Image (cartoon, rainbow, N blue to C red):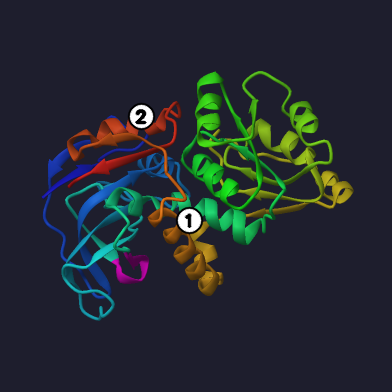
Amino acid sequence: MRALLCTDTGDLTSLAVQEVPDPAPGPGQVLVRVEAASVDFVDTLIATGVYQIPVPRPYVPGNNVAGVVAAVGPGCSRFAVGDRVHGMAFVGAFAERVCVAEAQLRPTPGGLSPDLACLTGSTYRTAYDALVSTARIQPGEDLVLLGAAGAVGSAAIGIGRSLGARVIACAAGAAKLEFCRDLGADELVDYSGGDLKSALKELCPKGAGVVLDMVGGPFSEPALRATGYGGRFVVVGFATGEIARVPLNLVLLKGSIVTGYEIGDFERHHPDEAEANRRALESLLTDGRLKPPITGRYRLDQAAEAMRTVAGRAKLGMTVLDLT
């Protein structure tokens, strides 16, 4: 079969589509014929060797996948050959076929297309879980999104609006802010050269209710300072590559709640809530209440280009490989 192969670390120059042996499902695994796979920033971190979980080379990148069951391994009972499924593989999805743990797959609803289904693997799941279960956002609250033009950020704009929040999108540069406006953001903040703290204070004079931080670095502290009393600051990622260090006296003085969201741990510790969130999210996508901004579509033979584009962080919205 054809697959994108990563043979080196440090950069993305070694990526190339090659012929590789067909995978065979082991115990507890399902073989999926891939129809669509999302290309996410975390895929580039794994490929460049800076992700917290190292992956031996050579390997096939790609986490989030949607497709059709081609075979089931020993001990699998939830799916049969021909079933439509979607879920997370961690690696291996940028290929014509991939083996995925049965526990990491879900049946794909009839009205959900492969390109939308693959986005529920982590992008939309992260945004939904972080807002609904971690931040416990309420209608009418001010929601500040750092990195709002990225994949998780743009998902959070739509979800935040569907939950009745006032969405304040923070991003770098006019093009990204215009993109966020088109997605429905209520307010825009350019943090590329301005005073983020002052801008947020002006927009949220009583303080923001929730901050979702996908970028870290120098933007975390001013966003934390802009929260209101009891505001929830949710750490999701560090797109800048810098882990912020904030003075904890801010938490004391403001009564802030600083917490984090990581998809695997949330699933393990809150399985029932995670399942309820998945069903709610799939319903929002199936009936069209959420419309993902898929701004990049690539074929498998363009997968290396897709990875490099996403790694450059100039990409807006979401990127999908189409293997249909």
Percent x, y of residue 36 = 26, 49
Residue 2 vs residue 112, the one in the foreground: 112
Q: Residue at x 41, y 54 (%)?
A: 285
Task: Assign a secondary structure to mark 2.
Answer: helix
Q: Position of residue 94 (x, y in %)?
A: 25, 47
Is 212 on the left or on the right of 82, as rendered?
right
Tell me which amino acid carries mark 2.
Thr
Task: Tell me if residue 14 can be seen.
Answer: no
Q: Is residue 255 left or right of residue 33?
A: right
Tell me the residue that label 1 is attached to. 125
Real-space CA distance between mark 1 and mark 2, rounded to the nearest whole angstrom: 23 Å
Span colored in magenta: 101-107
Numbered mark located on residue 309 in the image? 2
Q: Is residue 34 above or below residue 155?
A: below
Given contact means CB atoms under 8 Å apart, are the residues at marks 1 and 2 in contact?
A: no
Rendered view: 51 above or below 134: above
Q: Residues within 10 Å of mark 1 (few under 14, many from 20)?
A: many
Element carrying mark 1? helix
